[in-house]
Amino acid sequence: MSAWRQAGLNYINYSNIAAKMLRRSLKPELRAEALKRDDSNVRITPWANGRPAHLQTAAK
Amino acid sequence: MLGRAAPGVCQVLAVANQQQNRNMATLKAISIRLKSVKNIQKITQSMKMVSAAKYTRAERELKAARPYGEGAVQFYERAEVAPPADEPKELYIAMTSDRGLCGAVHTGVSKVIRTRLAEPGAENIKVICVGDKSRAILQRLYGKHILSVCNEIGRLPPTFNDACKIAGAILTSDYEFGSGKIIYNKFRSVVSYQQSDLPLFSQKAVESSPKLATYDSLDADVIQSYMEFSLASMLFYALKEGACSEQSSRMTAMDNASKNAGEMIDKLTLTFNRTRQAVITRELIEIISGAAALE
């Protein structure tokens, strides 16, 4: 078992951290373009019983 | 914006009708209506231009993303992975976006899932809605099946980090599924897309697949890492395909809308001119007959 998995990461976290490091260590003229690919806007809401989970806990 | 124009016209009509039941009032109403339809046409035209620009970018990016998805699917096909018989739980992922006005892209995806949920065995299915549109369609009837909802999709082109976040959410959720499907719109050409699916399997299903031996030096650790990565890359591919079909579909939808508005404008201008002519003629008749009566 690899060290990063023991630390509770999965492969996605692991490779994302590696990719982030790689982007940061690029030459300045390439870095600007690469950093644009680094962001993410998705918001994830867990649902339960047909309602968003955080609303349910708030109702109780 | 579109809905607001119509009641305004009705109000003007009603007020005008109270004042006088003549053609003059409709003339005013027609010109207001004409103006609003022209504005709508301007809006749809500019929306078409915007989505055309977004579409070219999406298609370029889709070409680059295609190997991610195809590679992952190839692995499942070569290894002949089959859904495990002892684990009936399934996970469906609906790939849509937050934005509407783009034809039937979102309804198509949601319909596939709705028909699946109407079949027997639906109690073992959970759905992840990517994009607000599929959530809006599914939450009323099948809200209990929704495991989580991802939104803020479609404003900007999807990135690999987006896919990673969704994949992370699937992996960390304590829902253990045996198999599943990503339902998305596969982009075929500017005017056509088709609902397709990508397979998802649990690690157990992959390990017990008959032809796994075609691949060399696999152990549980490698398989687990690969499963995680392939989930993210398939999601990324599906997001890209979906974004591309959505933009192309919005382009056609807005083109049609502009065309319809154009037709409406033509008809309205015709009636406007006719009414105007009628009003002038009537006024002339009134003047002439008045003058004739005085003689």
Image: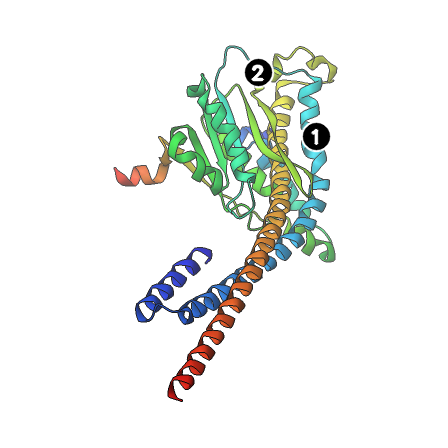
Which residue sits at x=44%, y=20%? Answer: B122
Quadrant of the image occupied by residue B243:
top right
Image position of B226 (left or right of B1): right
Q: Is residue B146 above or below residue B153?
A: above
In the rendering, which numbered label is found on residue B83?
Answer: 2
Q: Looking at the image, which residue is at 42% across and 80% down?
A: B289
Using the image, name the chain to which the residue with label 2 belongs.
B
Which disc, if any, is residue B292? Answer: none
For the question of whether residue B187 can be seen, the reply is: yes
Q: Position of residue B161 (x, y in %)?
A: 59, 42
Can residue A17 be seen in this snapshot? no
How is the structure coloured here?
Answer: rainbow
- Counting from the top left corner in percent of width and height, residue A48 is at 37, 32
Task: Find numbered disc 2 in the image and state the secondary structure of the residue it sits on.
Answer: loop
Q: Residues within 10 Å of mark 2 (few under 14, many from 20)?
A: many
* Residue that mark 1 sits on: B70
Residue drawn 55% across the image and 57% down it: B264
User: Is the residue at mark 2 from the same chain as the one at mark 1?
Assistant: yes
**Residue type (three-letter) at the residue carrying disc 1:** Glu
Return the x and y of residue B291 as percentages of the image width and height.
Answer: 42, 86
Q: Which residue occupies the foreground of this view, B110 or A26? A: B110
Q: Secondary structure at mark 1?
A: helix
Given residues B56 and B35, the one toward you in this image is B35
- Which residue type does callout 2 highlight? Pro
User: Which class describes the residues within 10 Å of circle 1: few (<14), some (14-19), or many (20+)?
Assistant: some
Q: Quadrant of residue B174?
A: top left
Q: Quadrant of the N terminus of chain B?
A: bottom left
Query: Quick check: B146 above or below A35?
Result: above
Circles 2 and 1, Cβ within 8 Å, touching? The answer is no
Give me the chain letter of mark 1: B
Judge whether B68 appears above or below B246 on screen: above
